[in-house]
Amino acid sequence: MTDQSTYHHGNLKEALVQAGLDILNQQGLADLTLRACALRAGVSHTAPKNHFGNLAGLMSAIAARGYQRLTETMQTGLPPDASRADRRQAAMGGYVEFARQNPGLFELMFSPQRTNGDDPDLLHHAGRCFAVLCDVSEGLIWDKSDAPDAALRAQVMHWSMVHGFAQLTASGKLNKGEMKHLQIFDVFPQFDYKS
Amino acid sequence: MTDQSTYHHGNLKEALVQAGLDILNQQGLADLTLRACALRAGVSHTAPKNHFGNLAGLMSAIAARGYQRLTETMQTGLPPDASRADRRQAAMGGYVEFARQNPGLFELMFSPQRTNGDDPDLLHHAGRCFAVLCDVSEGLIWDKSDAPDAALRAQVMHWSMVHGFAQLTASGKLNKGEMKHLQIFDVFPQFDYKS
DNA sequence: AGCGTATATTTACACTGTAAATATTTTTTG
DNA sequence: CAAAAAATATTTACAGTGTAAATATACGCT
């Protein structure tokens, strides 16, 4: 059904998301418009409405795909039997590297303005992304208490840390002076672990 | 020179920034347009060009004012002789509360897409904001080493933490389940201090 | 007073997202 | 298999946006 000569595109939903990702890569967030995506997918500028409703719907789908890719990036380059510490290093490094290399997409993913915060697909993939960080933060000793929600607090702390560093880096706030050369592992060394 | 009957506005630069802040408060980031700011300030939609060049210039000025207010928010409600620990608590709490109460402005402030990252005023006020966080992080023991850049790394860690939590909160990523009720002080308890 | 400059307006234009009406294809149904 | 129904895409129209150019008005200075 991917015939090019048909009136119906056949796989327009996917093609539009892909077009959006390409535009983000090659041009930037400023050029990510509904019409530009449609043009790149070879359809009229009102065709996306059938699949995404409106601009925010398309943006949300692109952001959801972004979370999917971020999740993959956090898990690449790992031997199948990697330790949790190694997996955590990979996740943290991948998160920051993703933000650095995809600043437009990263900004879109965390822009409540442009996306629908209640989009089911977006929620799902963002949740899976967070789940990876939760997994690698298991056993982390953050505060020494054994309160029942200690694990949850460690997870939120871990995500906040990594995300904050990633966003400050990607948005250029840390590109001055000596801070420019700081890597995330310089700033966030190994944590203690529970025995 | 704030005469209303004059052809020249008299203080348009300030009026436009104020109009932008009002729009962000009362309507949201989606309605923050050049024309809307001009209308609210009572001038034609091309008047801002003389003072800010283009939309990005106006947005940068509004963002700069945002950093100014954020800095103030981090320092309010403090007795003149407050301890550094109290000042740090105030700064952290103020940062998060600011993001919660001004989500549109906060998103604008950290949006490289909409602002000019090299705007001198923006750089200055963002720097002053960061300086407050650096000040209250003084003496913080983050890693136990005494490497020469230990202080810098603690500062970057501290900003990343606070900013990450603030942005995840303001963007609704932490509004699910038990995380919803987490305050920043639950997640980031007191740090150790150097003797 | 007069001139240069700063500031503001008018007008025009290309681009954006959305809606309504229409056309085409696919799918369902009788 | 034919007809009806639904899904998908197009055309057209429109209000809104930022920007640029030409023009108008006020200010500041000598």
Image (spheres, coloured by chain):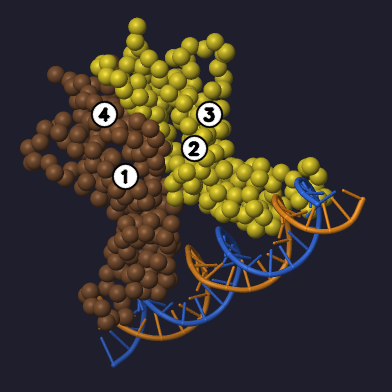
Chain colours: A yellow, B brown, C blue, D orange
Element type at mark 2: helix
- For label 2, count other residues whose C-alpha is less than 10 Å away and answer few (under 14), some (14-19) or many (20+): some
Q: Amino acid at mark 1?
A: Ala
**CA–CA distance in space, label 3 to label 4:** 27 Å
C-alpha distance separating marks 2 and 3: 13 Å
Q: Residue furthest top?
A: A195
Subunit that carries the residue with mark 4: B
Residue B152's image quarter?
A: top left
Question: Looking at the image, is mark 2 or mark 3 earlier in the sequence?
Answer: 3
Horizontal side of B107 relative to A45 (left or right) equals: left
Query: x and y percent of residue B71 in the render?
Result: 24, 45
Eye-nearest disc, 3 or 4? 4
- In percent of width and height, residue B107 lies at 39, 47
Q: Amino acid at mark 3?
A: Thr
Q: Is residue A138 visible?
A: yes
Give the number of the mark in front: 2 or 3. Answer: 2
Of mark 4 and mark 1, the one earlier in the sequence is 1
Work out how far the residue at label 4 is from the one at label 1, CA to CA, in angstroms: 17 Å
Above or below — where is A14 with respect to B60?
Answer: above
Q: Residue A17's image quarter?
A: top right
Mark 3, chain letter?
A
Same chain letter for marks 4 and 1: yes
